[in-house]
Image: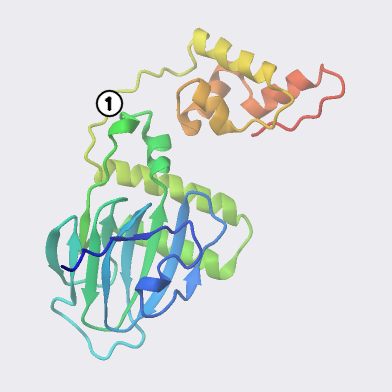
Amino acid sequence: MKLPQPVRIIDYRQVNAANALLPQSSILSSGCWSDIHLELYQQPKFEIAEHQHTMHVIACGLPCPFAEQEVSDSSGERWLDGKLSKETRNTGDIAIIPANISHRCNWNTSVQFMILAIEPVLLKQIGQDWVNPDCIELMPQFMSKQDALIQGIFLTLKDELESGRIGGQLLVDSLKTVLAIHLLRNYCATSPRLSSYSGALSPAKLVLVTDYINAHLHQNLTLTEIAAIAQMSPYHFLRLFKQSMGVTPHQYSCKAESIMPNIYCNTAN
């Protein structure tokens, strides 16, 4: 009796993660971005075996520079979590493959496409101000329609990889935040909850946070770590802290350290 083959795992945190399953390796790959990873592929006609991803994955079709012919009908099939769909895959169409679901696909023609892998924790960190982070569920999406915003993010990130212009890390951080919010709004099975946050931190949370900063001035605190004390996302916490104190957490901690001898200001922004 032939035993079933184990499902392959693709972890884009690892170098060349998908090479064993694809005919050709990626021609462009990000390597130092936090929470997201971009790959650009050019492949001949192929079929990829069933696998799962450890990260959420978005695939975006591109014009293929070496396609044998123009294809106007279905150019392949995709199985997502056991469901099959024949896909047209026009340029700019996207597919969404959530983490830890079964996936396989085939392509009837040569193809060029990009994938963007996203850490699931990123959606939780950004979405916790509006939804229960433990209930965030990204929905599978077959490659059957376009999303102009996601397509623009793909192309901008590709350009950043190719050009490496000034301010690149700030650009990537901004784009991944925009992408996470867009996914939460449009591709998640979650219902937004009304935020209980006002225009400033509550007195109790303000005392909790400032006491924590004062007690850890000797450490290299991060914004994410401090925001966790207030049980908020870093993005929401930063705005409310500044409204409450008139300064950022970094400025507050530096001011507190200035009155303490022999301690250098090295806390996070």
Between 141 and 155, the one nearer to me in the picture: 141
Where does the image place residue 252, in percent across and percent down from the top left? 68, 22
Where does the image place residue 251, in percent across and percent down from the top left? 69, 26
State the residue lying farthest toward the bottom: 68
Between 2 and 215, the one nearer to me in the picture: 2
Residue 210 lies in quadrant: top right
- 122 lies left or right of 164: left
Q: In which quarter of the image is the C terminus?
A: top right
- 107 lies left or right of 257: left
Q: Name above or below for residue 69 compared with residue 42.
A: below
Residue at x-position 27% and y-position 45%: 138
Identify the residue under disc 1. Answer: 193
Q: Name above or below for residue 190 compared with residue 205.
A: below
Q: Name above or below for residue 236 compared with residue 180.
A: above
Residue at x-position 75% and y-position 21%: 255
Number of residue marks: 1
Residue at x-position 57% and y-position 57%: 32
Residue at x-position 49% and y-position 16%: 201
Does residue 248 show up? no
Does residue 250 show up? yes
Between 100 and 34, the one nearer to me in the picture: 100
Q: Name above or below for residue 228 compared with residue 49.
A: above
- 32 lies left or right of 255: left
- Residue type (three-letter) at the residue carrying disc 1: Arg
- 155 lies left or right of 97: right
Where does the image place residue 209, in percent across and percent down from the top left? 57, 17
State the residue lying farthest toward the front: 1
| SS class, disc 1 | loop
The crowding category of the residue bearing disc 1, from other C-alpha atoms within 10 Å (few below 14, some 14 to 19, many at least 20), is few
State the residue lying farthest toward the top: 203
Residue 74 lies in quadrant: bottom left
Q: Quadrant of the N terminus?
A: bottom left
